[in-house]
Image: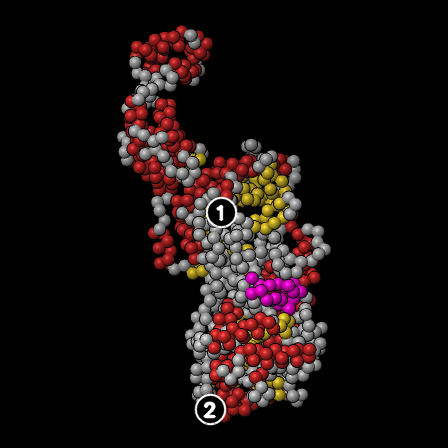
Amino acid sequence: MKITEMSLRQLTGALADGQISAVEAARAYLDAVHEKEPQVGAYITVTEEAALAAAGQVDKARAAGEALHPLAGVPCGIKDNICTKGVATTCASRMLENFLPPYDAAVMEKLNAAGTVMLGKMNMDEFAMGGATETSYFHTTHNPRDLSRAPGGSSGGSAAAVAAGEAAFTLGSDTGGSIRQPAAFCGVVGMKPTYGLVSRYGLIAFASSLDQIGPLTRDVYSNAMVLNALVGQDKRDATSLECPMKDFTQGIEEGVKGMRFALPKEYFAQGLDPQIKAAVEAAAKKLESLGARVDEVSLPDLDAALPAYYVISSAEASSNLARFDGVKYGFRAKNFTDVESLYRETRSQGFGAEVKRRIMLGSFVLSAGYYDAYYKKALQVRTLLKQRFDKIFEDHDAILAPVAPTTAYPLGQKAQNPVEVYMGDVYTVPVNIAGLPALSLPCGKDSNGLPIGMQMIGKPFGEAALYRAGYAFEQNGGALV
Amino acid sequence: MNKDFEMVIGLEVHAELKTATKIFCGCSTKFGAEPNTQCCPVCTGMPGSLPVLNLQVVDYAVKAGLATNCTIASFSKEDRKNYFYPDLPKAYQISQFDLPLCSHGWLDVETEAGSKRIGITRIHIEEDAGKLVHVEGHGTLIDCNRCGVPLIEIVSEPDIRSAEEAKAYLQKLRAILLYTGVSDCRMNEGSLRCDVNLSVRKKGSDKLGTRTEMKNLNSFAYVVKAIEYEFNRQVAVIEAGDAVVQETRRFDPATGKTSSMRSKEDADDYRYFPDPDLPPICISEEKRQELASQIPTLPDERKALYQEKYGLSALAAEFLVMRKEIADYFEAAATLTKYPLIAANLVNSEIARLTPEEGTVPVAPAHLARLADLSGEGKLNSSMCKEVLSILFKEDQDPDALIAKGGFEQVSDEDLLRSMAKEVVASSEKILADYRSGNKKAFQALVGQMMKRTKGKGNPALIQKLLKEEIGE
């Protein structure tokens, strides 16, 4: 079996047994990167030398008989909005083209301590704003399932690299679907954890109350293995929480017998591709056949989630991105005459159109006289939606829903129509608004052979149940990709 | 000062809290370090960094609130105040908007005009900004050491009607913050700064006029000068038939004048919203009580005690309690003397003046008490007390021994003094004529001549008696 085709369980087993070395694993993946990057374009930065050096360290430690983390020597890719000390972290923006963070994000400290081998930084929509990785300042990423199509976004590079075998796993971030939707488009598994489960320290903020880091992998078990390495309360992130689970792979094989799933009809309303509807319903039947109970339920006010999301996320973004002003780090325009024009020129030239659109939207909804009508209203919707979800979780373990209304669309198709791209987030944003965990996994293919994604939405800290259900589905013929 | 108008003043005071570390990170707050040596990714707003609230900041702010009779919010939150300025690395300041930690407080001030209660609208916590340093040949540089130093902002009601009241309010507030130990209140280091909001109106009117704001005044004297100048300026504007413009004005200490900085039209819309990085602040009743139990005896309690127990005037007592170390000293001396009132006067007139800010009094309380006794018993007059004290300040020693060494005993030799009095009266025809024509103050000039002849050591009571006899009263 080719190294780049192994699941994480197989790869970590082979590394632990000494069947392959970390350097061999890194080399295999770097070869794949060299081979496929010209077509796929998943990476912004490839850190080949550092990767081989890190892999060498792992092999040395293993040879010395040191106790190693299960993920030691596993080659991975990191979304380019996660700070990596001394390695350019650009957010796919001209604004941070040459930004070298002086510190590692909390998740990088954890991964580095575990001995994973970073191959490089992944392409994304600029500052994670977009749904096709087309707003990247650097280049377009192509969907490995069909190179003429978008990989989804904003973690498009992370999803494409996993689908193309250019990394054993990647990290993405999910503010309104940015892990789940590209996972669905590329036919891989992506987890958006409960808000607070993974430290945001070092994640360059888009919308602080919604952002979460999570793993993308080729299969469910691998995903649980990676999440194990990311969780834990971090005293540097006041919103991070203690993780109640020690090991998400524990009990993952126990099956779905007795589990109760909810199928809210609002997730299957107009605008959803009928093939996706059919695939998710078929998945529900499959889970029923495996012993689960599936109830059709109602989740009122779900349609309010999308506008509330765009108000809240843009408001927070307008503030979070204000620090990129050309004063202290990052891009600085040359043609300025005073402080005012330094700001204006730097921000005009440093940000792309989509980022500017969100900053203007966010500044507007927070401005005097409009706050109550927009921002405050959106917070009320947020509270309401949490209650709606809570109600369903009173007698269900998880919710089944489509990830996106369409499968991967051709590159360039929606670039000129931002509202259409926003509409594509309609099924993913409610999870962020409510702070819930959700697993995105493949559940079929459409008539073009493109992957269809399904999401399992869980209770707060209900990741283990999602992995268990996802694993059962995948192992019983669910993974058609 | 125009007597037809009155001024309406509200003060916003920023006080740096005395925490060892900053409000959202572990960097030191120490003043005066080399530029940019006390900062980290968090306080310099590096991408991806996150704030975590220093709980000591909340404790201090709550103490300040409790000491100024505020209601403490059981639920409070932090908000972002968004604006661009190079000394603000995140381009927003974390502050508190609609739910401050403390509100609805007050404090009492004492002026020549009497006692007055000034309302405190709110006290909230926030982070300080950095400092811009203009260096010849290098343009403007940024020092981030002050970024994230914790502040409380104390906002008064517009209850203040004179520069004296404003000064008294600031002094009282400063005393309270020092007593509670929440701030050093070092104005020269900028750890206490004051913004003045001032408007004027015709006396008797209950309508507020258009106000102007003068920012970052860092001495009480500047506050007084700025208020006086701005009052006269606004009155002149109105009397000329013009309208006062709502604006921020800069006070220039060199000229004593204020000048326009920016008008309200240019004012930022700060787009406040709750900071999503920081959970709400919840203060339980137990926590509130625990902090309340740590509040020491406050200036007003001491003031009332001194008035009642020692018969001090309100003003004298207020002055005495303004500095905790001075009040502590007085209390120690007062228990050792039969004449605490004299001790209080000596402390207010000499000790407070000679003791540097935050310094300790170098004279043992027992020594001051002994001087008060000697004075009370008529053995030392006040100028001799002052002289002895100035020596004790240089080198503290037993006052009896010092006096015994000579030169300090009061001159009470009646024969000697009478012959001097005769000479003084004989050689002061003009003063005597003045005195006899009704100017009773002229008598003091005669006393002064006697004191000069006795080198300040004459017994004042005896001198007065003998002079009157010689004049023939």
* Residue type at numbered disc 1: Phe
Residue designated by label 1: B31
**Residue A291, label in figure:** 2
Name the residue: 44% across, 43% down. B174
Name the residue: 70% across, 61% down. A349
Of badges 1 and 2, the one in the foreground is 1
Magenta span covers which residues? Answer: A85-102
Quadrant location of residue B80? bottom right
Name the residue: 50% across, 38% down. B220
- Say whether residue A317 is left or right of residue A252: right
Q: Does dot 2 land on a helix, a strand or a loop?
A: loop
Q: Where is residue A366 shown, x and y percent of the image?
A: 59, 61
Q: Does dot 1 land on a helix, a strand or a loop?
A: loop
CA distance separating discs 1 and 2 = 68 Å
Q: Where is residue B252 shown, x and y percent of the image?
A: 59, 38
Name the residue: 46% across, 75% down. A64
Residue closest to the far bottom: A289
* Residue type at numbered disc 2: Gly
- Up-down: is B374 above or below B156? above
Q: Is residue B211 visible?
A: no
Identify the chain of the residue marked 1, using the numbered disc in the image: B
